[in-house]
């Protein structure tokens, strides 16, 4: 049981975030999350030798540095009575540990089979949603996921994982690609118009093939904007990518100015001070991962956190790493997350599918690089 949890703890933890994004399944997902955290903490306590070999492993030292920063911040600016801050500290530390253990003990699975299983799970979520609600063009479609932006993120990840897979595509694969694309557009999330083209660039580069695809996409764009729908294309044509984000950035900056050096605390991720938001405005969040981290930690600790994330991420964005087909999707995911963090807070939360997959991608790429350097 312990060995199985070491190998597949990440899978349980990651797919549990889907339960947490389904309103009727939230309580079950929350109980499973707390259970996983408690079980893994117990496993570490009874297997302390694992800490030396994995948590202190060179490939995962960026996780260790981030954990040290969190501990120092908690010691300086929180007390033992700050339950939510302590919960964040423990959850983040255990999350990084679960990812590290899974990659270390089950690298071959994540290299060869995980993405296929990921695609099928996302397909299952979409299929259940279509059975329950087939009206995909009546407003912003969300299926069984309570937030259409989260469904969009799932679809884009499923599409990209399948497109960037080096295996030969079957007819069913092409049908899945079309399904992921259609559903992602019907969510109305404008991030789709960034995520999907980026996946094509990673797959085919700046080629004639991509130019043809781009011309075809423009033709579809011009047709769809003439129809009264709430697809990603229609919302982009009406609002652009950043129109409604500028107000949120404004209040995020105003929040940061109140505590610029040391921020509002570990438990205040994706936070805007509600006291400065005028009455009548709702759903005001940073929607910017970099601003969110600065509001959370302040410039002093936030600079350290962002430096580690960016340094580690950029180290994989090179031609040599992309030559390895098993790395391509994970490198794409890192690039997509860093760029999309300008208009979404994708590098901050605890129980968010895309965020966890981003941290996993960094760990996988880091361990893959270590194995290659040491001829393992």
Image (tube, rainbow, N blue to C red):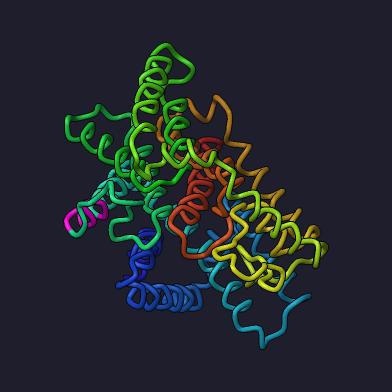
The relative height of residue 371 versus residue 13 in the rendered view (above or below) is above
Determine the image quadrant of residue 142.
bottom left
Most distant residue in the bottom direction: 81
Whole-percent x and y of residue 155? Answer: 35, 45
Whole-percent x and y of residue 222? Answer: 39, 25
Q: Nearer the viewer, residue 153 or 65?
A: 153
**Range covered by the magenta-colored residues:** 125-131
Whole-percent x and y of residue 49? Answer: 53, 68
Q: Nearer the viewer, residue 138 or 207?
A: 138
Quadrant location of the N terminus in the rendered image: bottom left
Q: Residue at x 68, y 43 (%)?
A: 311
Determine the image quadrant of residue 340.
top right
The relative height of residue 359 versus residue 295 in the rendered view (above or below) is above
Let me know if residue 280 appears in the view. yes
- Is 128 colored magenta in this rendering? yes
Q: Nearer the viewer, residue 14 or 178?
A: 178
Compared across the picture, whether 284 is left or right of 177 comes to right
Compared across the picture, whether 333 is left or right of 117 comes to right
Whole-percent x and y of residue 304? Answer: 75, 54
Q: How many marks?
A: 0
- Is 290 colored magenta in this rendering? no
Query: Magenta-highlighted stretch: main secondary structure?
Result: helix
The relative height of residue 310 versus residue 287 in the rendered view (above or below) is above
Q: Residue at x 53, y 72 (%)?
A: 48
Let me know if residue 12 appears in the view. no
Q: Residue at x 51, y 36 (%)?
A: 372
Q: Nearer the viewer, residue 92 or 274?
A: 274
Compared across the picture, whether 199 is left or right of 83 comes to left
């Amino acid at each position: 049981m312990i060995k199985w949890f070491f190998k597949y703890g990440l899978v349980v933890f990651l797919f549990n975030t889907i339960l947490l994004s389904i309103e009727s399944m939230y309580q079950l997902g929350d109980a499973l999350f707390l259970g996983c955290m408690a079980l893994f903490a117990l496993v570490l306590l009874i297997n302390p030798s694992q800490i030396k070999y994995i948590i202190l492993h060179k490939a995962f030292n960026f996780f260790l540095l981030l954990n040290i920063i969190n501990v120092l911040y908690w010691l300086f600016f929180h007390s033992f009575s700050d339950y939510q801050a302590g919960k964040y500290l423990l959850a983040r530390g255990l999350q990084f540990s679960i990812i590290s253990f899974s990659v270390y003990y089950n690298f071959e699975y994540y290299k060869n089979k995980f993405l296929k299983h990921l695609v099928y799970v996302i397909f299952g979520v979409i299929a259940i949603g279509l059975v329950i609600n087939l009206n995909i063009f009546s407003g912003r479609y969300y299926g069984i996921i309570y937030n259409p932006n989260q469904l969009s993120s799932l679809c884009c990840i499923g599409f990209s994982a399948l497109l960037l897979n080096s295996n030969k595509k079957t007819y069913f694969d092409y049908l899945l690609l079309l399904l992921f694309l259609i559903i992602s557009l019907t969510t109305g999330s404008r991030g789709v118009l960034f995520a999907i083209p980026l996946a094509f660039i990673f797959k085919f580069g700046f080629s004639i093939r991509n130019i043809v695809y781009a011309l075809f996409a423009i033709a579809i764009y011009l047709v769809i904007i003439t129809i009264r729908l709430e697809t990603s294309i229609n919302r982009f044509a009406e609002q652009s990518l950043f129109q409604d984000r500028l107000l949120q950035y404004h209040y995020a900056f105003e929040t940061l100015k109140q505590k610029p050096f040391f921020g509002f605390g570990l438990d205040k991720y994706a936070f805007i001070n509600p006291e400065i938001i005028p009455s009548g405005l709702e759903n005001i969040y940073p929607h910017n991962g970099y601003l969110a981290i600065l509001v959370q930690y302040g410039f002093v600790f936030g600079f350290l956190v962002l430096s580690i994330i960016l340094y580690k991420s950029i180290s994989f964005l090179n031609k040599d790493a992309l030559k390895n087909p098993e790395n391509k999707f994970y490198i794409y995911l890192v690039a997509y997350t860093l760029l999309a963090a300008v208009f979404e807070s994708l590098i901050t939360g605890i129980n968010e599918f895309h965020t966890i997959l981003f941290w996993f991608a960094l760990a996988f790429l880091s361990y893959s690089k270590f194995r290659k350097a040491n001829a393992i």
